[in-house]
Image (cartoon, helix red, strand yellow):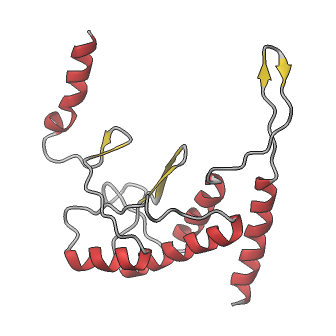
Amino acid sequence: MRKLGFQREWIELILKCVMTVNYRIKVNRHLTNKFIPERGLCQEDFAALLNKAEAEGRITGVKICPNAPSISHLLFADDSLILVRANRENAMQLQSILDMYETCSGQVINREKSAVMFSKNTGDAYRVVVKRAMHIEKERVNERYLGLPVSVGQSKTKTFNYLKERVWKRI
């Protein structure tokens, strides 16, 4: 239990340092006044928490094949895609990480904008368990994320045909 308290103190210190950053922008060879960012997810800290949890075996990322490295998250701008196996243990650990992040950073995850996506092989029972553990109701069944296909089936030609069509339209 002491170890968790130490980790939380350490994370709070790091987040405090990151949150006190300020910026100046050069416009027409002149620097603007300093400003402090007020919004957005400190993704480096969030990624560090996820990487640590995966390294310690508390969450299991996904692999595209048996010899590939596992991936537990993809971050883009203010968008986070968390990739873990759909089971109660991973969902509980991920929820614990999110709770710690919210506590330390003061930022709150918007559950109404959050959604979970499952592999087509995930059974209904696992879907219910994961959504309950994560306190997320919405299940997304999009075929694309950030404009790219979420899954690629047997027919890669069919999956990526839209790219070919878009290129031809521009030519």
Give the image quarter of residue 9. bottom right
**Image quadrant where one finds the N terminus:** bottom right
Q: Where in the figure is residue 68, as x and y percent of width and height?
A: 38, 54
Name the outermost residue toward the front: 112
Q: Could you tell me residue 42's position as x and y percent?
A: 65, 54
Quadrant in which the C terminus appears: top left
Q: Is residue 158 left or right of residue 61?
A: left
Residue at the image position 19 percent from the left and 38 percent from the top: 159
* Number of marks present in the image shown: 0
Using the image as rendered, state which of residue 8 and residue 112 is in the foreground.
112
Q: Residue at x 17, y 48 (%)?
A: 153
Left or right of residue 101: residue 70: left
Is residue 57 in view?
no
In the image, 110 versus 140, the foreground residue is 110
Q: Is residue 78 above or below residue 168?
A: below
When asked about the image quadrant of residue 161, the answer is top left
| Residue at screen point 58% across, 74% down | 99
Q: Is residue 171 above or below residue 146?
A: above
> Where residue 146 sits in the image (x, y, percent)?
39, 41
Q: Identify which residue is drawn at 31% across, 60% down.
A: 117
In percent of width and height, residue 92 lies at 46, 79
Quadrant position of residue 86? bottom left
Please state which of residues 37 and 18 is positioned toward the viewer in this rendering: 37
- Reply above or below: 59 against 2: above
